[in-house]
Amino acid sequence: MDYIAVGLAGFLGAVSRVLLGKIINTWLGWSFPVNTLIINLTGCFALSFFLTLTLERLEINPRLRLAIGTGFLGAYTTFSTFAVESINLIRNQQVWPALVYLLATPLGCVILAWAGSVAAMALAQRQAG
């Protein structure tokens, strides 16, 4: 049953990533892979917020936690696309955009994961009283 929950949530996460990526590309129209950057940044914040909140304050079914954390958010974020896009920037001699992307993604993801955890802990403390 865990596999089905993760698979269904993963499907929704992957579809969300594709749709949001298309919306961002249409809206901005940049050659820089800002869509993947935004998706990975928001995914890191969301995963950290969700896991911190469900471990600190909100008791939920472990299968639901697995489906949302591993399934939906795991499929929503994409490290492999980040890697390929980085290589493509370098191959296209876009060295500065590649360096920005290579620095912004891991640093931004860690910072936003930390922010998600802090936000969830603050919410949990406020709920506790």
Image (spheres, rainbow, N blue to C red):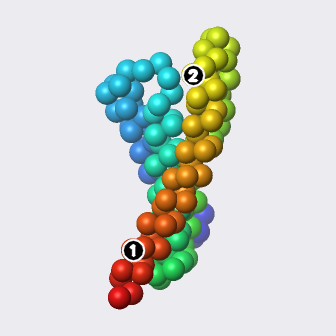
Residue drawn 49% across the image and 67% down it: 118
Residue at horizontal 35 percent and vertical 82 percent from the top? 127
The residue nearer to you, when weighing 52 against 17, is 52
Residue under circle 2? 97
Residue 103: quarter of image: top right
User: Which amino acid lies under the numbered mark 1 shown in the image of this protein?
Assistant: Leu
**Type of the residue with mark 2:** Pro
Q: Please say whether residue 105 is visible from this viewpoint.
A: yes
> How many residues crowd around disc 2 within 10 Å: few (fewer than 14), some, or many (20 or more)?
some
Q: Earlier in the sequence, mark 1 or mark 2?
A: 2
Nearer-the-camera pick, 65 or 12: 65
Residue at horizontal 51 percent and vertical 27 percent from the top: 33
Q: Is residue 94 above or below residue 87?
A: above
Element assignment for label 1: helix
Residue 43 point in image, percent of width and height: 50, 51
- Residue 22: horizontal and vertical position, in percent? 39, 31
Q: Is residue 117 left or right of residue 3?
A: left
Q: Residue furthest left?
A: 27
Question: Which residue carries the number 1 mark?
Answer: 123
Where residue 1 appears, as percent x and y from the top left, is 57, 70
Q: Residue at x 57, y 22 (%)?
A: 97
Q: Are marks 1 and 2 in contact (CB under 8 Å)?
A: no
Please name whichever residue, 116 or 85, is drawn nearer the observer in this view of the structure. Answer: 116
